[in-house]
Amino acid sequence: MSSSEKRFIYADNAATTRISADVLDAMMPYLTTEYGNPSSIYALGRNSGFAIEEARAKVAKAIGAKPGEIFFTSCGSESDNWAIKGTLARLAPKGKRHVVTSVFEHHALLHTVQNCGYDYTLVEVDEQGLIDPQKVKAAIREDTAIVSIMFANNEIGTIQPIAEIGKICHEAGVIFHTDAVQAIGNVEIDVNEMNIDMLSLSGHKIHAPKGVGALFCRRSMIPKNLIDGGGQEGAHRAGTENVAGIVALGRAIELATADIPKKVARVSKLRDKLIGNILKIEHTRLNGDPVQRLCGNVNISFEGVEGESLLLSLDNEGICASSGSACTSGSLDPSHVLLSIGLTHEVAHGSLRLSISEDTSGEDVDYILEKIPPVISRLRAMSPLWERIKAAEK
């Protein structure tokens, strides 16, 4: 196939990833022959229970935790909700009724905080999407129950100074939670060295299936139950366990964290090639910190271009990409993340997120770079906004 022929390129791994063959093989027995309920006492049920505990140990090892500190959930959003709502439910009666978070969290966290019924403070970010730990320190009050800062932003890829923020929280005697959904498998994480008390993660970002996640939580800080019922997950999260999904998550996180430096070295090289060449197009800008960013994240704004038209045009070329979070892709509102770093509504609307992975090849990158410039030129040729931008230059 020549470089000019249409290919299929998946560059939206921040939205979801394909299930790897190894992970699928690991989970298949628990969808077929090993179908026992883990709560049953006969052998078929006990086998499922043993598999869950093996997966729990793998997740714990991947982040430097203890198996008893890992609680399986349905997704990262549930984990975020549980961490915030459960902590407030436990500590509010003791006078701890305040939450500190940032303006550009994932909506699973941001909306939870805004709708929790308690007071909260949103910490601003700089134009690169970085949070100043001292601003977090200044936002902490005597009645602060929990601080939640995402490890790495899902849209612009900026990696936060998590260890420093965690240290500030511990010095203030405040629980520190981080949404690490995008960071797992891309950044080496040790919850003890990084002063993390709670951590949310999700399987489908690391080549496990959708519908399974986990919450790391120190035993002394377990939030009040979000879901009541049976005695699953140590009586902290009710519901018959998704055994196949949990097994898949265990195997996926084991693979994702096996050699992170090697993955980062390879993928970041492809990322930098994409960024360097796309920025040669006039009136473009990189969103997010150029250094402290996820190895597979490329987020660039094109002035005079409408994001939805850009995505559809790339789709016609066989390229899957996004303009921001998959959870808000149906919204016509500009990204709250891009607005928080100072972009205007018009520029934010013309943004493209490419999120590549270890599965992305050099040929894939070359194809993307071949297709983007003519697409941008064609869309700008039809744009009244682009006409005004060029007229202003003259």
Image (cartoon, grey):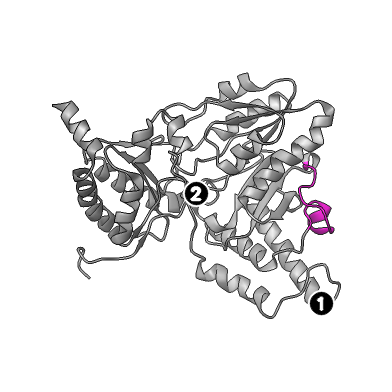
Q: Is residue 43 above or below residue 244?
A: below
Q: Which residues are magenta?
A: 222-238
**Which callout, 1 or 2, points at the residue further toward the start of the chain?**
1
- Residue 201 horizontal/vertical position (percent): 61, 50
Q: Position of residue 107 (x, y in %)?
A: 57, 41
Label 2 is placed on what type of residue? Answer: Asn
Which of these two is toward me, 294 or 87?
Answer: 87
Return the residue at label 1.
43
**Residue 361 placement: quadrant:** bottom left
Question: In the drawing, does residue 355 fall left or right of residue 188?
Answer: left
Tag 1: Cα neighbours inside 10 Å, few (<14), some, or many (≥20)?
Answer: few
Q: Badge 2, how many Cα within 10 Å: few under 14, some, many 20+? A: many
Q: Report x, y in % for residue 114.
A: 64, 34
Which quadrant: the C terminus? top left
Looking at the rendered structure, the secondary structure element under dot 2 is loop
- The image position of residue 51, as x and y in percent, is 71, 67
**What residue would you read off at disc 2?**
186
* Residue nearest the observer in this picture, 167 or 74: 74
Instruction: Give the position of the N terminus as an image quadrant.
Output: bottom left
